[in-house]
Amino acid sequence: MLIRRFALKMSQTPKPIVHQAIGARLNSFKFRPRRLTYLHKNELFLPKTNEIKALVARPFYLQQWFIAGAGDIGGTFLLPYCSEPEQAFVDMLRHFKIDCLTREEVRGPMGLNKNMHCKVLHELIIDKIKTATVAKLSNATSEQLDELKRLELAKLNLVPTVDQMYEFYLVRQDELLQQQGQAIPFAASCLIEMQKTLPFFLTTGFPQNTTNLLLKAKKNQIPTVEHVISSDEVADRSRPSMVSQGLINLGFLPKRIERFDKSLQKELIDNVMRRVFFVTDAVNDVQSVRKRFSTMNIIGVTRYGTGMGIDDPSKISEMSDEELLERSKKAGEKLLDAGADKVIPDLSQLIPTLEKIAKQHLTQRHEKSCSF
């Protein structure tokens, strides 16, 4: 009864006062906010009947600082290790009888839109053929030169165009995405809680048709996300443009920002991005977003991302915890080097990490306002 009266009283009190009052009152109730969790529903969320705990569990600083959030789909919220897209690229190369690329080289451009990924692989194939030919030419006799040049030309002619590679890739990718794969732990609970807390949208390097197919096939793994931006919805198909478009759709950026003076554009974008976060597993995403938005809060996720370098997810059970931890650490170092502000192992740490970042920003702003 005492708890119910207190909760009713606090619901009629301004937020900062509620936070302070609950923090002081908790000592007498023998539990602390740090023991609580942001997991939801089937993943151990707080009882709905306990109003005091529910008030404390909501991320207080996060709501005070951040105005919106964005995330990547593949390897972050869906498709562990991006195994389906990666396998589609491998099958595409096998179809065209190209065997000069390693699995690591195929995985390298992950995070780019899929058309650009095919373009990078195409350039890499051409370079490999030319490099191998040059090495042979350096040791060839004058009689062998013409024959080697003819063979190089024949190999180059057999290389498919970027459009041919992309067309086959899309078909194979759509086949793989419809299969019922493994879900990423904590993705569902994280998205549910995030969308309750602030405006949130997802971005993806897939074209819109593939995105719709993916979300329909995996609807039992994550909740419905109202705002999803696909690569073909923006002119240059880049991740930063997808982030900008999502913020335009939510009303945080003007539709025709180019009308403003360049210095004013930069000031406006910097001020908005300072209060927006982006979460991803891909190094390419971090690099491109950091290059365009210097003030944005970027969170890297390692455990189920492409940086783990997992060729076959079915063999994860054969790996030791030490090996997985080592792979996760290396992936985290790459994300930090690319420009990520923080790196977390999995999505269970996302909201607590954002809460800490928001608290730091608010503390710094308070200190500046109090300095004379």
Image: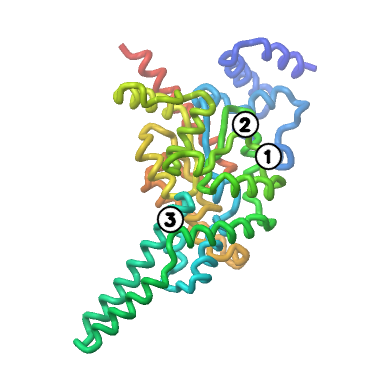
Q: Could you tell me which secondary element the residue under label 2 belongs to?
A: helix
Which residue is depicted at the point 57% across and 28% down? 199
Question: What is the CA distance from the residue labelled 2 to the residue labelled 3?
Answer: 30 Å
- State whether residue 368 appears in this view: yes
Q: Amino acid at mark 2?
A: Gln
Judged by depth in the image, the label closer to the viewer, 3 or 1, is: 3
Earlier in the chain: of badge 2 and badge 3, it is 3
Question: What is the CA distance from the residue labelled 2 to the residue labelled 1?
Answer: 10 Å
Quarter of the figure with residue 3: top right
174 w.r.t. 277: above or below: below
Which residue is depicted at the point 41% across and 61% down? 121
Horizontal side, residue 51 vs residue 193: left or right: right
Determine contact: label 3, label 1, CB under 8 Å. no
Label 3 neighbour load within 10 Å: few <14, some 14-19, many 20+: many
Residue on which the image places disc 3: 109
Which residue is depicted at the point 30% across and 11% down? 372
Determine contact: label 2, label 1, CB under 8 Å. yes
Q: Residue furthest right?
A: 1
Earlier in the chain: of badge 2 and badge 1, it is 2
38 w.r.t. 97: above or below: above
Location of the N terminus by quadrant is top right
Residue on which the image places disc 2: 195
20 w.r.t. 306: above or below: above
Residue on which the image places disc 1: 223
User: Which of the pair 105/29 is nearer the observer?
Assistant: 105
Q: Amino acid at mark 3?
A: Pro
Which residue is depicted at the point 69% across and 56% down? 180
User: Which of the pair 80/91 is nearer the observer?
Assistant: 91
Judged by depth in the image, the label closer to the viewer, 2 or 3, is: 3
Label 1 neighbour load within 10 Å: few <14, some 14-19, many 20+: some
The label on residue 165 is none
